[in-house]
Image: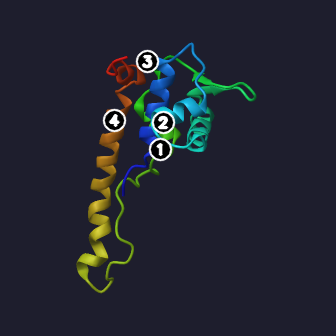
Amino acid sequence: MNISTRFAVAIHILALLEINKGDKNTSEWIAGSVGTNPVVIRRITSMLGKAGLIEVRPGVAGAKLARAAGEITLLDIYLAVDAVGQDSLFAVHDHPNPDCPVGQNIAGAILPVFSLAQQAMEDVLRKVTLEQIASQIPV
C-alpha cells in the first residue's frame, strides 16, 4: 500500500504558504505550483484547516499558516490528511488459506513488525518541521 499523495501535496501547499507568506495564496495559484486541479487543493486545504494547520476565511481568497512553520511537524501534516490509517501502512493479504499452518499464522507473525515499522516512520516525521523543509527550497 502506498502512502496517499495527499501527504506530499499537503507538504507542498504548506511550504508554499510559508515561503509566500504575506501574499494572496489562492487555490488556483497553489494548484498551478502543485500541477493539479484547484478542487484537489481546496479538498486538502479543508483537511489542513480542520487540523488547525492553516486558516482559510470564507469569501476571502487565500490561506495562511495557523501557526509558525517551526511548530508544524511532518507528522502533524501526515495525520491531518489521513495519509494512512493507524497501523495500516502495511497491509496483509485478506484470504490466506486457513488449512495451511503458515496461512493460519502469518498475520499474527508479521503485523507486530509492520506496526513497529509504521511507528518508526512516524517517529521520524515527528522530528522534521515544515520550517526545515521550506528552508531547503531555494527561492
Q: Can you identify the residue that label 2 sits on?
A: 10
Q: Quadrant of the N terminus?
A: bottom left
Estimate the x, y position of residue 30 in percent, counting from the top left. Answer: 53, 31
Circle 1 or circle 3, nearest the eye: 1
The part of the image, by quadrant, that contains residue 46 is top right
Task: Classify 23 as above or below 93.
Answer: above
Q: Secondary structure at mark 4?
A: helix
How packed mark 3 is, by other alpha carbons closer than 10 Å (few <14, some 14-19, many 20 or more), is few
Q: Can you identify the residue that label 4 sits on?
A: 123
Q: Amino acid at mark 2?
A: Ala
The residue at the point 32 percent across, 60 percent down is: 111
Q: Can you identify the residue that label 1 sits on?
A: 6
In terms of depth relative to the viewer, which is nearer, 55 or 139? 139
The part of the image, by quadrant, that contains residue 133 is top left
Distance between mark 2 and mark 1 Cα atoms: 6 Å
Q: Quadrant of the C terminus?
A: top left
Distance between mark 3 and mark 4 Cα atoms: 17 Å
Q: Amino acid at mark 3?
A: Gly
How packed mark 4 is, by other alpha carbons closer than 10 Å (few <14, some 14-19, many 20 or more), is few
The part of the image, by quadrant, that contains residue 74 is top left
Looking at the image, which residue sits at the far bottom?
99
Task: Classify 20 as above or below 124.
Answer: above
Q: Can you identify the residue that label 3 sits on?
A: 70
